[in-house]
């Protein structure tokens, strides 16, 4: 059965409420940190005198770092726990950002090295905080993950606005990035003190833990680190995540460009359309959990996929600016829930959550990283607007595969989530 925001829902104990706040800090901090760097890319480009293609190659260092970290992070989280992983990776991110800050003064190769460390830190940090978020969701007994991802979105907005402010004040790039790196290194590790202990990361050789497992009929022996890559359900959940990540990444990178180049709108209109997309996506993630608790994962994800299909196609054929506004709002709202719900589905079994989240995140982030460039390549041949129609095709596939998001076993009341 599904749950909704009713009085009969389980009340989270204080440690779960504390863990929820701590996980919010991890998500918001990740958003602030990454957006702070992104907000200074134009100044870094000018300082290093990079062409567009050279800048693209420099930014590829982040993607390479993330793609290496994502598949390896599952075994790491399973072994040491989400708290220790977030601490280590946020510190690695901070070191990378410090290297970038100093590298801006020295040359392009130190910046590339720093961005590679940033990518490594971001990838594993993301998996670990999603694993912790799923644990909190299960202990609360209600949908939580979309709201945590809304926290990340809020963090990106805050980081971008702060970046715009320091640019207006002519704060040097090294000073700005060094301050952000130091804050991340202090605030995020401190927040993990409120994290829940990962069930799968507890020492299996501890006699008391062994006794607990003997009494727990749901306990399963530890498997190989990469076993989740062989699970059909996990791979299908990954495809759903990929489709929604592709839709989100395309919206992030191409709405403003398509409005300007495809429809001849002004840069201001293009930026406002992009802002509308982000606002709708953030609101969908904030208010979506109550809808999921009432109706269940599968029907909600299918419904939002349809919304995103309608919105993206309407954007392609929008005859007026106001139609384009409606289109991006539907697109953003429809894109909002698919990726975080996929993270929840990957975490249904706490024993294997780390490995499965790693797989789903790896597949999904391939779309985040490779999707927007694919739109660019197609755009050179058929135009950006027509290329955007690929979003609707992938979301149609996601709607068909949404059944994979249903838990493998009907959960029982208690510390596990009852969301369908």
Image (cartoon, rainbow, N blue to C red):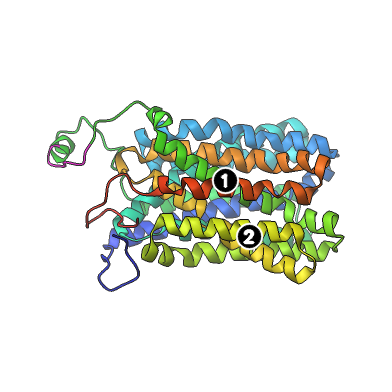
The residue range painted magenta reads 214-219
Q: Which mark is residue 96?
A: none
At 57% from the left edge and 43% from the top edge, which residue is drawn?
94
Q: Earlier in the sequence, mark 2 or mark 1?
A: 1
Looking at the picture, tell me which residue is in the foreground, 111 or 342: 342
Q: Position of residue 400 (x, y in %)?
A: 49, 47
Mark 1 element type: helix
At 16% from the left edge and 35% from the top edge, which residue is drawn?
210
Is residue 317 found inside the magenta-colored segment of the image?
A: no
Is residue 417 rendered to the left or right of residue 103? left
Q: Which mark is residue 243?
A: 1
User: Callout 2 environment at 10 Å: few (<14), some (14 to 19), or many (20+)?
Assistant: some
Q: Position of residue 274 (x, y in %)?
A: 71, 61
Spatial CA distance of label 2 from label 1 is 15 Å
Instruction: From the image, state whether disc 2 or disc 1 is nearer to you.
Output: 2
Q: Is residue 403 visible?
A: yes
Mark 2 element type: helix
Instruction: Classify 352 as above or below 151.
Output: above
Q: Quadrant for residue 299, please give it.
A: bottom left
Is residue 59 rendered to the left or right of residue 214? right
Q: Position of residue 143 (x, y in %)?
A: 38, 59
Q: Is residue 151 visible?
A: no
Looking at the picture, tell me which residue is in the foreground, 154 or 161: 154
Q: Position of residue 368 (x, y in %)?
A: 62, 43
Q: Name the dominant secondary structure of the magenta segment.
A: loop
Q: Which residue is mark 2?
A: 310
User: Callout 1 environment at 10 Å: few (<14), some (14 to 19), or many (20+)?
Assistant: many
Q: Quadrant for residue 312, please give it.
A: bottom right
Q: State which quarter of the image contains the C terminus.
A: bottom left
Q: Say whether marks 2 and 1 touch (CB < 8 Å).
A: no
Q: State which quarter of the image contains the N terminus.
A: bottom left
């Amino acid at each position: 059965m599904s749950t909704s925001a009713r009085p009969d829902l389980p009340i989270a104990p204080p440690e779960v409420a504390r863990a929820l706040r701590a996980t919010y800090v991890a998500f918001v901090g990740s958003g602030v940190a990454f957006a702070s760097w992104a907000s200074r890319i134009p100044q870094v480009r000018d300082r290093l005198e990079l062409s567009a293609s050279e800048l693209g190659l420099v930014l590829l260092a982040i993607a390479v770092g993330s793609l290496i970290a994502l598949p390896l992070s599952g075994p790491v989280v399973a072994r040491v726990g989400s708290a220790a992983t977030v601490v280590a990776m946020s510190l690695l991110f901070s070191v990378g950002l410090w290297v970038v800050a100093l590298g801006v003064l020295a040359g392009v190769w130190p910046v590339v090295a720093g961005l590679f460390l940033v990518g490594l830190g971001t990838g594993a940090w993301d998996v670990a905080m999603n694993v912790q978020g799923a644990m909190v969701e299960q202990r609360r007994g209600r949908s939580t993950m979309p709201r945590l991802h809304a926290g990340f979105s809020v963090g990106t907005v805050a980081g971008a606005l702060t970046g715009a402010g320091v640019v207006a004040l002519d704060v040097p790039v090294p000073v700005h990035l060094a301050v952000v790196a130091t804050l991340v290194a202090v605030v995020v590790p401190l927040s993990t003190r409120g994290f829940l202990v990962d069930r799968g990361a507890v020492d299996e050789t501890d006699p008391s833990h062994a006794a607990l497992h003997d009494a727990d009929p749901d306990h399963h022996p530890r498997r190989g680190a990469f076993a989740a890559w062989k699970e059909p359900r996990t791979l299908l959940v990954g495809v759903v995540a990929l489709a929604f990540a592709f839709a989100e990444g395309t919206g992030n990178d191409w709405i403003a460009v398509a409005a300007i180049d495809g429809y001849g709108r002004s840069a201001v209109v293009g930026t406002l359309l992009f802002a509308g997309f982000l606002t709708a996506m953030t609101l969908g993630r904030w208010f979506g959990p109550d809808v999921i608790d009432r109706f269940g994962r599968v029907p909600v994800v299918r419904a939002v996929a349809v919304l995103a299909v309608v919105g993206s196609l309407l954007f392609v054929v929008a005859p007026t600016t106001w139609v384009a506004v409606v289109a991006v709002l539907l697109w953003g709202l429809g894109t909002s829930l698919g990726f975080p719900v996929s993270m929840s589905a990957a975490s249904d079994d706490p024993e294997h959550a780390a490995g499965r989240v790693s797989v789903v995140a790896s597949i999904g982030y391939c779309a985040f990283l490779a999707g927007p460039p694919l739109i660019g390549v197609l755009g050179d041949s058929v135009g950006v607007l027509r290329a955007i129609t690929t979003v609707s095709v992938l979301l149609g596939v996601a709607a068909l595969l949404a059944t994979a998001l249903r838990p493998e076993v009907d959960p029982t009341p208690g510390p596990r989530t009852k969301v369908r």
